[in-house]
Amino acid sequence: MADVKQLIYIVDDEPLQAEILKDHLVKVHKCEIKVFATGEECLKFLEKDKPSIVFLDYNLDSQVRDAMNGVELLKVIKAKLPKTECVMLSGQNKIEVANQAMQHGAFEYISKGDDALQKAEKTVFNLNLLMRQSWDSPTSPERAELVFANRNKEFGAYVIRKGYNKTTAQALLISLAVFTLLISGPVIMNFLNPGDDAGIEKPVEVTVDLKEPPPIDKNEPPPPPPPPPPPTIETVKFTPPVVVDREIEDEDQPPPQEELSETNVGVVTQAGDENATELPDEEPVADPDAGKIFTFVEEQAEFPGGEEARITFLQKNIKYPALARENGIEGRVYVTFVVGPDGSIRDVKVLRGIGGGCDEEATRVVKMMPAFKPAKQNGRPVNVQFNMPIVFSLK
């Protein structure tokens, strides 16, 4: 069945069995076969002919005394021609003989008997498949036939391997067709509907000619100059007291009382006009804590009426959620919010909840609270972060 006529050696000291095997293989595989009675005779032509397969008998020394046996010949062949496959023949149906042959590189072990010719035929067929270049491909038809020989070929794996190349080609063509359609689809649509852009107004370019300004009348009098700034009086900068954690610079020190009795207090220190009678407009002093949210303050924000009023408000307005009541959910919901400088409440969030609708109910009631007494820092109302636990109890 091989595509190329190949050379096979048969080394057997029993001429009748060797000729029977030769006639069978030539008839089936159409190959060239040479028969040798001893291993020494085989080795004379081995490297010159380089056979692809060698059938060798295990007991080659039965007719010639001290002749090379099958195992020794196997070692020499595999050493000289590693790619030549060897098949061991033996009349001894022993597992020890088979193991010894396989350990030294034999491809197959065949026990001489009624089915020896069929086994040899199948072995040559398998070896021919292995020698094909397509054997490396798991989807090659030859490999599929060998793998599923004497098996149920209706099995899904055989069908997949058999039609793999065809299926791959079809999938590739379909993918290319879909890709081409996606790319060319917009172009085709524009070609089929050329009037879609008819309703789109194109921009119109308008050229505007600007006239030259009228000439300047030299006889017209110039506009009057701006009035001079009002005279200023001498002032000394007064820095409002602020609590800080650093040493006060000399320039930020307040002026002494003697200097304040002789001049006026202002936002800057400046020399003035002796004839001035009015102070310059004062610039507003920026609040350094404006917009800052404090965690700790000198005076904490407070619910109007105190802690008892806060508890009374919560008890009066909280409605126990039905889902929490049915499931027996109890515990504390921790709510955080910001009390502004005007006492208003904003940014209400749940830090840790218990679920069952209690988190939402706590948020709702906190947003209903009246304006707090604002927190103060350095005597000024500021933003402060306020944390409040709200207890839900079924008792």
Image (cartoon, rainbow, N blue to C red):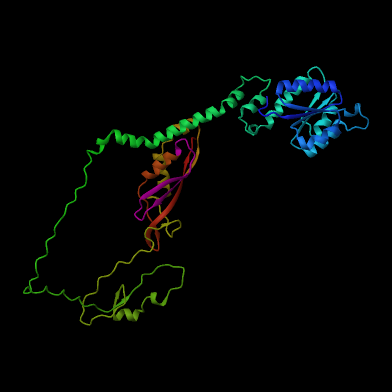
Left or right: where 165 falls relative to 148: left
Residue 343 part of the magenta-drawn span: yes
Q: Position of residue 270 (x, y in %)?
A: 29, 78
- Residue drawn at (67%, 25%) of the image: 146
Q: How many marks?
A: 0
- Residue drawn at (46%, 70%) of the image: 246
Rendered position, 217 above or below 347:
below
Left or right: where 346 falls relative to 353: left
Query: Residue furthest toward the left?
Result: 219
Can the viewer see residue 71 in this picture? Answer: no
Query: Residue furthest toward the right?
Result: 65
Nearer-the-camera pick, 178 or 298? 178
Can the viewer see residue 250 in this picture? Answer: yes
Nearer-the-camera pick, 202 or 147? 147
Query: Residue furthest toward the bottom?
Result: 274
| Quarter-of-image position of residue 269 | bottom left
Nearer-the-camera pick, 357 or 110? 110
| Quarter-of-image position of residue 75 | top right
Q: Position of residue 169 (x, y in %)?
A: 51, 30
Q: Position of residue 33 (x, y in %)?
A: 76, 27
Nearer-the-camera pick, 116 or 175? 116
Residue 326 part of the magenta-drawn span: no
Left or right: where 12 falls relative to 365: right
- Residue drawn at (19%, 51%) of the image: 205
Left or right: where 155 falls relative to 221: right
Rendered position, 93 above or below 175:
above
- Residue drawn at (78%, 23%) of the image: 22
Q: Quadrant of the N terminus?
A: top right
Q: Position of residue 250 (x, y in %)?
A: 41, 77
Tell me which segment is drawn in magenta: 334-358
